[in-house]
Amino acid sequence: MSFKIINPNMQLNFQINRVLTYGELACDEAEVTKKTAQITTLDEWETVWTEMGDGAESRGEYLRAAYAFRMAEFFLKKNNPHKEELYNKCIKHFYAAFDNLKLQYERQAIPFENGTLNCIKLRAEKAKGSIIVCGGYDSFIEEFVLQVSPFTERGYDVILFEGPGQGDCLRQKMYFRSDYEKPAAAVLDFYKLHKCAMVGISWGGFFAMRCAAFEPRITAAVAYDVMDDGFEVMTGVFPPPLNSIFRLLYAVKGVRAVNFLIGKIRKRSIIADWAVSQGMYITGTDSPYEFYSSLREHNLKDISGQITQDVLLLAGERDHYIPRNQFHRLKLRLPNTHSLTSRLFTEAEGGEQHCQIGNIPLAVNTILDWLDERFTPNGGEVMR
C-alpha cells in the first residue's frame, strides 16, 4: 500500500495511516477510511475508534480490535477515565491475536530499578544472531510485533522491550528519560547477550544511537528513523515564527513567558494541547517549561563521537515529525563508526513518511539486507 490522504488534519491522517499500513490483518480499510475521514475533534476520534474496536472484538477479530483500541487511547489525556481501560483492552487483544496467529513469542518482565521492563522475544527457527528493538516516545512494543516479525524469517531472534515513559513502564511511574542504555543493558544482561544489533523505531532512533555510544555489546545500530535532537523536534511542531520565539524565551530561561506562550498555543490547537499534555505525562513533569527542559538531554551532539559500531541511518524526505536536517547533520557527526550507511527514502519509492508509514516493507527489507551483510551465516556473530 501507499500513504493515503484520508483526513485533512495532518496529525490525525498520519495516525490513520499507521493502522492502514499493516493491511487487512490490522483493520478493515474501507471501514476505517469511511469512518475517520470527517473526524475533526479528539472526542470524535475516541468515539469512532472505540466503536470500531468494539465491533472487531464482537467478531473475534482481535488484532483489529487491538489497533482500534490503541488509536482510541492515543489522543486521550492522562486524566481521562477511559485511558487506562482502553490501554488494558488494547494489550489484552494484542496477545489474543498473537496466540491466534501462532506467533512464536515469549513475554518477560525484566527487573529494572524499582520495577520491570515489558519485553517480547520472537524466536527464529535457526537463529544466526539477535536484534533488540525499541520504540520511541510513548509507544507500546506490542504495536511493532507485526512490523518486526519478518526479521525472524531471515534468521534473527528479536527482542522488543519498553523503557521508561513507554507502555507498561509509564504505568509503573517510570518516566521518559534519555539514558536508555541502562534499560538496554538490563535486557542484554537478562538474555546473556554478548553481541547483538539494535534497531530503534521513531524516537527510538535516538535511543539506538545513544545505546551504541555507551554499550559495546551492541555492535550494529539502526536509526529507523534518525532523531538526534528531541528539543528541536518538539519545538519544531510550532509554526514559524512561534518556534523561534519559544526557543529564544527558553534560552533566556523565561519560565513564566514560556509557560504563558505554550498556554496560548494550547488554546488555539487541540493537537498542540494534547502534545504538551502527553509530554508532561510521560516525563512526569508539572509544566511545559519542565517538560521541554527534560528533552534537552535527548541530544547526540556530545556523544556521537563515541559511536564506533556499524551504523545504518534512515529517513523519509517528507517526515513531518523529524526535520530532515537531523539526518544530514548526524551523518557528519559520526566520524568513528566502523561503517556508516544512510538512506533517505523518497516519495517516488513510497517511503517518504516518518518511519516509512505507508510502505513499511521498504524500510524493513532495507534493514534486513544491511544486517545480512554484517552477520555470519552461522554462529550468530556480528561481522567486524
Image: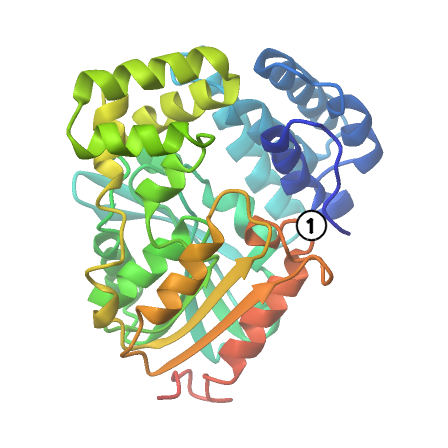
- Residue 258 x/y as whole percent: 26, 21
Could you tell me if residue 117 is visible in this image? yes
Amino acid carrying label 1: it is: Gly
Pick the front one: 75 or 264: 264
Q: Residue at x 69, y 18 (%)?
A: 39
Residue at image location 27% in from the left, 77% down from the top: 308
**Percent x, y of residue 247:** 29, 34
Where is residue 212 shown, x and y percent of the image? Answer: 28, 67
Above or below residue 165? Residue 124 is below
Is residue 100 shown left or right of residue 186? right
Image quarter where the C terminus lies is bottom left
Q: Nearer the viewer, residue 122 or 324?
A: 324
The location of residue 341, given as percent across then percent down, is: 47, 76
Q: Nearer the viewer, residue 8 or 46?
A: 8
**Residue depicted at 33% across the width and 55% down the height:** 207
Residue shown at 60%/39% (left/top)?
96
131 or 238: which is nearer to us? 238
Number of disc labels: 1
Taking the image as drawn, is residue 282 in sight? no
Above or below, 232 against 211 in this view is above
Tag 1 residue: 358
